[in-house]
Amino acid sequence: MLIGCESVNYYGQAIQGQYDILDNRQPISDIMADPESPAILRKKLGHILAVRRFAENELQLPVGNHYQTYVDIERPYVVWNVFAAPELSLTPKTWCYPVVGCAAYRGYFSEKNARRYAAVLSRQGYEVYVAGVTAYSTLGWFNDPVLSTFVQYSEGQSAALIFHELAHQVLYAKGDTAFNESFATAVEQEGLKRWQEKNRSSHLFRDYLSNYRRRQQFIQLILQYRRKLDSLYQSDASTMAKKDQKTLIFSALGQEFNRLKAAENGLSAYNGWMNDSLNNAKISSIAAYHDFVPAFQKILAAKDGDLNQFYSACRNLAEESREERHRILNGYLEN
């Protein structure tokens, strides 16, 4: 009965949170026409409208009525995701949802509720991690608005985000995050490259790639130590020995991060993540979700850059089983 009540409460907050966002939407055209609107907001929204038109006309993305409205949600994140993992395992706790399938996180529209649930999981023996999210896609169920959580992004960042979220409208393979995120990232990168060419903004894609590669460098560092932890947890060592070695591995990760940071100043952007209590839940939240990006880029090249043909080929892939999808994509990576 408690599980049932908790589930009802969870879906209740999700429905209410989504309703609050939809109910507070303002037409961007009204904001743009209002001289009382802050000039910087009008400039940012004007840029997003231009990106939206480009996405529809040049990238053939299913824009529909998305990003025609704006919501000031008056908080730094739209959703807080809760991750959990056992003390001596990197296998995350998962939750299953209608439509999207199972995921290794549980999202809350309230930070207080997210941290309250994280505390419940902690009392059950899990290590927990709560992460704020600035944007998400409703996968076509609603007309997604522009949110105050990402409207302040740079021109390149906001364009990349819009292209990425709209790519999720093209296809979605239930329960296959690596496929979905790699596809959306490939579209995001191709979109930003074409946006840069059209607008002659040579720095946009260069800056984007610099940040992207830096993020991938950080992710590869975490994955390297994730493998070390996983090997430890799978070993026959005693529980006490595993706990001691776990502490040493986390310490070594911190030292390696500081060494890399000294050579690459941009990695300091991850100071907050590294300094805020490393644990299995946090490590398990980092996965190789972009591994298939080069495979999707090869598919696009095989279609001579024709995005409609590319989308069609990728939709066909999405209809295959997860195993077959990954086999085909790995084939592209090997060639």
Image (tube, grey):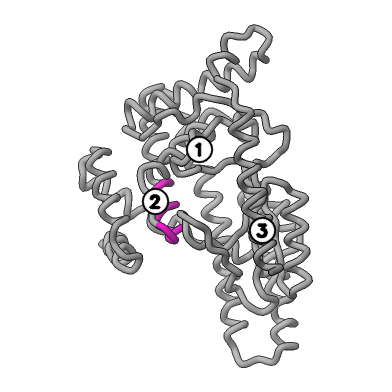
Q: Any mark on residue 172, and which? A: 2
State whether residue 251 appears in this view.
yes
Badge 3 crowding class, 10 Å Cα cut-off, few under 14, some 14 to 19, many 20 or more, is many
Distance from disc 3 to disc 2, alpha carbons, whole Å, reads 22 Å
Residue lying at 60% horizontally and 69% vertically, measured from the top left: 93
Q: Which residue is mark 1?
A: 161
Up the image or down, 57 lies above or below 93; here it is: above
- Residue name at image x 24 percent, y 49 percent: 313
Secondary structure of the residue carrying tag 1 is helix
- Where residue 252 appears, x then y in whole percent? 69, 70
- Front residue of 134/264: it is 134
**Quadrant location of the C terminus in the rendered image:** bottom left
| Sooner in the amino-acid sequence: mark 1 or mark 3 | 3
> Which residue is at the front of the view, 174 or 184?
174
Question: Which residue bears the numbered disc 3?
Answer: 82
178 in the magenta segment: yes
Q: Which residues are magenta?
A: 174-185
Find out whether residue 230 is within the magenta segment: no
Q: Give amino acid for label 2.
A: Tyr
Label 3 sits on what residue type?
Val
- Of tags 1 and 3, the one toward the viewer is 3
- Residue kind at label 1, given as amino acid type: Leu
